Amino acid sequence: MLKTLMNRRSYRGRYKSDPVPREDLVKIMEAGLAAPSGCNKQTTSLIAVDDPEVLSRLKATMDPPVAQTAPAAICVLTRRINAYRDKCFAVQDYSAAIENMLLAIVELGYQSCWYEGHITDDDRICDKMAEILNVPSDYELVCFLPVGIAEGEPSLPKKKPFEERAWFNSYPASH
């Protein structure tokens, strides 16, 4: 698992046309739903899309286009419910679910990319997607995860050295 975690990268390239078997989509979604949620409110829900017609309609909403060759996708929904008092952990809940799914996707031999800002920006692509998927109004579609076998390799972003971002016992005085 640590190898998968350390090697996972966002993939923005082309996908092979091989379909993603439903049993793999189920495993990916189960991994997402196994994530922790604040006060166990379970605010995250998922819709896997493997029907080429529905997927085509979703992809048509994206401007600029992304993941146009992906043979499947998982749309992440959230409900902004308070966990206790006036505290809502929906963002943390769906973020944990997405990370779990991204790791499961790589573990199963696929690639993906977390598309959130691209679809939740001012043009509200997410609302068009939600309409296509018949999402009830008390849910918000917050993420589009393409799933497929990569044609190429994910690009490796330059990461800052460990020592510049992680310490023991306190923040270093020299910073």
Image (tube, helix red, strand yellow):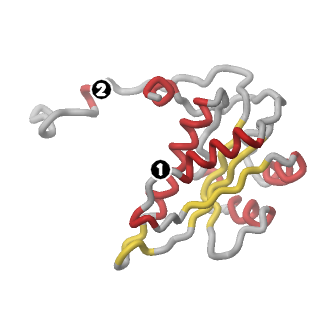
Q: Quadrant of residue 161?
A: top left
**Residue depicted at 65% across the width and 31% down the height:** 111
Residue farthest to the bottom, as pictured: 85
Q: Which mark is residue 16?
A: none
At mark 2, the secondary structure is helix
Q: Which residue is mark 2?
A: 162
Picture coordinates of residue 56, whole percent (x, y): 85, 48
Label 2 is placed on what type of residue?
Phe
| Residue density around tag 1, few if under 14, some if 14–19, many if 20 or more, within 10 Å | some
Depth check, front residue: 64 or 97: 97
Q: Is residue 174 visible?
A: yes
**Residue depicted at 71% across the width and 26% down the height:** 150
**Residue depicted at 47% across the width and 29% down the height:** 1
- Is 65 left, or right, of 168 in this rendering? right
- Is 150 left, or right, of 138 in this rendering? right
* Looking at the image, residue 33 lies above or below residue 110: below
- 1 vs 2, front mark: 1
